[in-house]
Amino acid sequence: MKNFISFILIALVIISCSTTKNTSPKNQEMANSTQNDTVRIANDELQYEVIIIDPGFNSWLISRAQPRNFYTQSYMETRNRMWVTNWNINVNSGRNRNLFEMTINYDNHIDYGYEVNYMLFNYLTYFQITNNIQLGGFPARI
């Protein structure tokens, strides 16, 4: 049986109310990059994965996130535990339904490995910074 840590966040696409459609190559390239901005990271040994669909996250990860091995796994796990707990509280309370759509199944007693924790940590950092929200405990910073 495969266990999944998965959360899918689909950012709202704002469509302008213009009467003409601009289909320049640059606009088409931006639209394609938004549609293809899916990040998947998996720990196949333990059969866990994180799937993130959020326009902007992949480019943020590449351009702003700290490189791998900058933080220790225990550092990221500590923050992930706190942030996921508060994330799930928001989901279950019904507040900000546009932002908090699905719970994150993160078990504190399972070692998900470095990559899964790295991606989850960076997504939660990105989410807090871009939405100007603090998930509690430790403020998100780069």
Image (spheres, grey):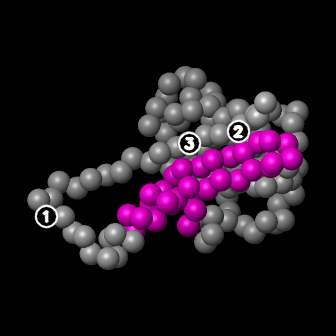
Separation of residues labelled 1 and 3 (CA atoms): 32 Å
As for residue 35 lying within the magenta part, the answer is: yes
**Cβ–Cβ under 8 Å for marks 1 and 3:** no
Quarter of the image for residue 7 reads: top right
Which residue is nearer to you in this view: 106 or 128?
106
Q: Secondary structure at mark 3?
A: loop
Q: Secondary structure at mark 1?
A: loop
Q: Amino acid at mark 3?
A: Ile
Q: Amino acid at mark 1?
A: Thr
How busy is the neighbourhood of tag 2: few (under 14 within 10 Å), some, or many (20 plus)? some
Question: In percent of the image, x 36 and y 51: which residue is there?
Answer: 13
Question: In percent of the image, x 25 and y 70: which residue is there?
Answer: 23
Q: Secondary structure at mark 2?
A: loop
Highlighted range, magenta: 30-59
Quarter of the image for residue 27 reads: bottom left
Left-right relation of 33 to 76: left
How busy is the neighbourhood of tag 3: few (under 14 within 10 Å), some, or many (20 plus)? some
Q: Does residue 48 show up?
A: yes
Separation of residues labelled 2 and 3 (CA atoms): 10 Å
Query: N-terminal of the two: label 2 or label 1?
Result: 2
Q: Of the numbered discs in the image, which one, if any, rests on residue 20?
A: 1
Which residue is nearer to you in this view: 14 or 79?
14
Q: Which residue is mark 2?
A: 5
Left-right relation of 13 to 40: left
The location of residue 96, given as percent across then percent down, is: 47, 33
Q: Which residue is mark 3?
A: 8
Left-right relation of 28 to 5: left
Q: Amino acid at mark 2?
A: Ile
